[in-house]
């Protein structure tokens, strides 16, 4: 299972765009990149998943360079309610043994 | 369509007692996964079950821990003779067969062993 490295914490202000980068140097050919969000006292919530290039949905964008050794989660115009821990995961599609690291604690200020 | 339901939300047990954690997957989901989260850490996989089958329990301690997902009713994670180190948040997730959009997690059960 590929290991990931992401910043421990980040601060931002309301209305700003936030980019969280994750490194996964030993990603395998059949691995997907998935991001989850977790609020205190709740389970993780799926945000977005991608394999290469760019993926966008109603809440975020995921940018993956050609070598796939890193990925960037982009949250447009964050609000206070986006304060949470964000996990970057790398695993084969449906990989249930996915390793959750410590994640990135995003703190959005008013 | 209710999400993944876990109960109880909070559970306090004395050392040596048994803890039973329940998980009802989302409607239409046939796969259940249990994870444990210690404070300030990420989730660690414990066990993967389908109805009446344990598919992978490689993340679950060999002693005192067991899990089941019967034909009828919720999945149960059972911890016998709890110790203080078992104190953690236990999350259940479920997925349909294809798992293309990740897993749906419950709100967890916070077990405190006193």
Image (tube, rainbow, N blue to C red):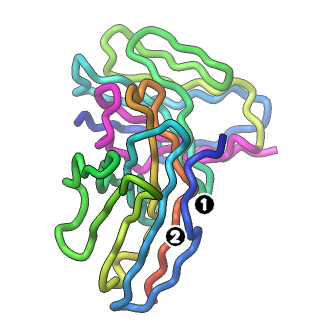
Gap between marks 1 and 2, in whole Å? 9 Å
Q: Is B99 colored magenta in this rendering? A: no
Can you see residue B81?
A: yes
Q: Residue furthest right?
A: A110
Kindly identify which numbered label has been placed on residue A41. 1
Report the number of discs: 2
Kindly identify which numbered label has been placed on residue B110. 2
Q: Which residue is drawn at 33% across and 25% down?
A: A93
Can you see residue A9?
A: no
Q: Residue at x 38, y 16 (%)?
A: A51
Decide: is B95 above or below B72. above
Q: Which residue is drawn at 69% across and 41% down?
A: A82
Instruction: State the image quarter where residue B70 is shown.
Output: bottom left
User: Dividing the image into 4 quarters, which one contains the C terminus of chain A?
Assistant: top right
Residue A99, given in percent of the width and then of the height, sits at 32, 44
| In this picture, residue A71 sits left or right of residue B80 | right
| In this picture, residue A60 sits left or right of residue B52 | right
Residue A100, given in percent of the width and then of the height, sits at 38, 46
Residue B25, given in percent of the width and then of the height, sits at 50, 48
Q: Residue at x 22, y 27 (%)?
A: A26
């Amino acid at each position: 299972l590929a290991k990931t490295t992401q910043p421990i914490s980040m601060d931002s202000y309301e209305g700003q765009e936030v980019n969280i980068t994750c490194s996964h140097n030993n990603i395998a050919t059949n691995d997907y990149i998935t991001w989850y969000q977790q609020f205190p006292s709740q389970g993780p919530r799926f945000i977005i998943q991608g394999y290469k290039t760019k993926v966008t949905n109603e809440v975020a964008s995921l940018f993956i360079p050609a070598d796939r050794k890193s990925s960037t989660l982009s949250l447009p115009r964050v609000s206070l309610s986006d304060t949470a821990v964000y996990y970057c995961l790398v695993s084969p599609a449906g990989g249930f043994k996915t390793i959750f690291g410590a994640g990135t604690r995003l703190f959005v200020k008013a | 369509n209710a999400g993944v339901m876990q109960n109880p939300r909070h559970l306090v047990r004395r050392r040596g007692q048994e803890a039973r954690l329940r998980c009802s997957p989302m409607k239409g989901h046939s796969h259940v996964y249990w994870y444990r989260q210690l404070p300030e850490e990420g989730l660690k996989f414990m066990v993967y079950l389908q109805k009446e089958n344990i598919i992978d329990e490689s993340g679950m301690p060999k002693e005192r821990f067991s899990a089941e997902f019967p034909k009828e009713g919720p999945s149960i994670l059972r911890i016998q003779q709890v110790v203080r180190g078992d104190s953690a948040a236990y999350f259940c997730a479920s997925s349909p067969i294809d798992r293309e959009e990740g897993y749906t997690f419950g709100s967890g059960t916070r077990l405190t062993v006193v």
